[in-house]
Image (cartoon, rainbow, N blue to C red):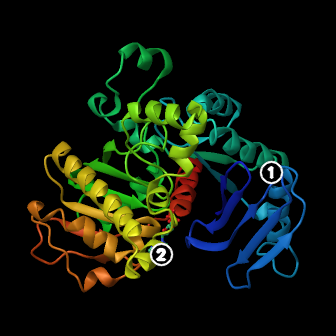
């Protein structure tokens, strides 16, 4: 089955076409600057990357341009659009309503709209992508795969905040967690790779990218994760602060004369390793700067690793042990120095990193020594493939 996987943001749309039998990516790319001017990037499996500047006033034009590229007589991968048999949409926030992926119908769209106050930037944009596909692809079945769904198994003691209970009852204010598709995919893959049963393994997945989160997976179920009601909680990230005393927010808002909204913008977009280093949110730039003696870049990287190690320690406690620690996403898959710095805090778990193996990048590899009590795994994530598999499973 050929599945079009869509990840739609407010002004961008990423896509992949995956054949579910071979799990091969037939084409991929993105539309950028939707509603501003418009730019399509299209990369077929065996062809050159094409970039086309063209007006995209709305997501509907963006979807049309992607589909036109897929059936282009010269560079397309399909003869006709009938060859697209399903669409899988990444949906960010499913609240407490969705503990699994779903086939999209009007009822589902209404329920996702109802979760929009929990994710005001993401959910409306995701639904614009759904509507645009419905308009152009008419009767092709569509699935919604939620970032939050995998974490719906967390127990109350993990997901409730220490605030008046009525706020949970009235507004569903609680920890939800994100990157669920990645945490689920990587933890399953780790069990397969190690030849261990998924339902009796204690795994900690470190999804370290531009957005970062850590998840404790016990016997195949998420039991805790570092992101919260929104993706702002938890680790120090590329531009997000992660955990911070709420009183510091009031203190700084008064000092800087900023509104709550402006302060949250600072915490989401101007903080993290970018804010600390004053340089970049990209670890490649930070690593370069550290090697040139930049002290703030060094502090930023140290803070990032220290916070990650603290979360790993707390999840080892939450699960009363840990068998496997996985590193995934842009930083986790590529930055051996960051992995080494995080693991340097974890000797008390009996963890020993193999420094030679830790030189690997982007390839499934055991990074721990044979006598290490915890297996450390470099496990590349693949959220698009996970969405494709979920979509096909729903249609079977
Ligand atoms: P992601 O959000 O998973 O796409 O990860 C993006 C981030 O991965 C970038 O911002 C970089 O900080 C990081 N990254 C990608 N490649 C490397 C690399 N070779 N070394 C260090 N960090 C990298």
**Cβ(mark 2) to ligand 1 < 8 Å?**
yes
Residue at horizontal 35 percent and vertical 59 percent from the top? 304
Res. 105 image quadrant? top right
Residue 12 vs 229, above or below: the answer is below
Q: Position of residue 246 (x, y in %)?
A: 40, 32
Q: Which mark is residue 1?
A: none
Residue at horizontal 36 percent and vertical 16 percent from the top? 165
Res. 87 image quadrant? bottom right
> Helix or strand or loop: what does disc 2 sit on?
helix
Q: Position of residue 289 (x, y in %)?
A: 44, 76
Res. 306 image quadrant? bottom left
Q: Marks 2 and 1: which is nearer the front?
A: 2
Q: Locate the N terminus and report the quarter of the image it occupies.
A: bottom right
Residue 392 vs 162, above or below: the answer is below
Task: Kindly report the distance in space between the C-alpha atoms of the residues bearing marks 2 and 1.
Answer: 32 Å
Comes first in the chain, label 2 or label 1: 1
Local crowd size for mark 2, using a 10 Å CA cut-off: few (<14), some (14–19), many (≥20): few
Dot 2 corresponds to which residue? 284
> Helix or strand or loop: what does disc 1 sit on?
helix
Q: How many marks?
A: 2
Dot 1 corresponds to which residue? 59
């Amino acid at each position: 089955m050929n599945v079009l996987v869509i990840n739609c943001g407010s002004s961008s749309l990423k896509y992949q076409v995956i054949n579910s039998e071979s799990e091969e990516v037939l084409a991929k790319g993105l539309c950028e600057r939707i509603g501003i001017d418009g730019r399509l990037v299209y990369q077929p499996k065996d062809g050159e990357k094409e970039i086309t500047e063209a007006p995209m006033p709305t997501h509907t034009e963006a979807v049309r341009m992607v589909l036109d590229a897929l059936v282009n007589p010269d560079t397309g991968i399909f003869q006709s659009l009938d060859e697209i048999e399903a669409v899988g949409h990444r949906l960010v926030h499913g609240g407490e309503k969705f503990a699994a992926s779903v086939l999209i119908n009007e009822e589902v769209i209404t329920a996702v709209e109802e979760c929009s106050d929990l994710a005001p930037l993401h959910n409306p944009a995701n639904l614009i992508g759904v509507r645009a596909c419905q308009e152009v692809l008419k009767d092709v079945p569509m699935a919604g795969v939620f970032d939050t769904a995998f974490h719906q198994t967390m127990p109350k003691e993990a997901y409730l905040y220490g605030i008046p209970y009525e706020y949970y009852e009235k507004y569903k204010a609680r920890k939800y967690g994100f990157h669920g598709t990645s945490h689920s995919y990587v933890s399953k893959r780790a069990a397969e790779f190690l030849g261990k049963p998924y339902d009796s393994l204690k795994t900690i997945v470190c999804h370290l990218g531009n957005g970062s989160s850590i998840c404790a997976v016990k016997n195949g179920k998420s039991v805790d994760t570092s992101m919260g009601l929104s993706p702002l909680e938890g680790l120090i990230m590329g531009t997000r602060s992660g955990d911070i005393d709420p009183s510091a927010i009031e203190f700084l808002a008064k000092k800087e004369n900023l509104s709550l909204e402006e302060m949250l913008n600072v915490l989401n977009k101007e903080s993290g390793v970018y804010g600390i280093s004053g340089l970049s949110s990209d670890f490649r730039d930070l690593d370069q700067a550290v090697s040139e003696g930049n002290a703030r870049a060094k502090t930023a990287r140290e803070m990032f690793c220290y916070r990650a190690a603290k979360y790993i320690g707390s999840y080892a406690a939450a699960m009363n042990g840990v068998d496997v620690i996985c590193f995934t996403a842009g930083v986790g898959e590529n930055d051996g120095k960051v992995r080494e710095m995080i693991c340097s805090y974890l000797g008390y778990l009996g963890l020993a990193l193999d420094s030679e193996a830790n030189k690997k990048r982007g390839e499934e590899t055991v990074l721990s020594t044979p006598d290490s009590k915890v297996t450390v795994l470099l496990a590349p994530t693949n959220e698009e493939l996970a969405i494709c598999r979920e979509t096909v499973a729903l249609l079977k």
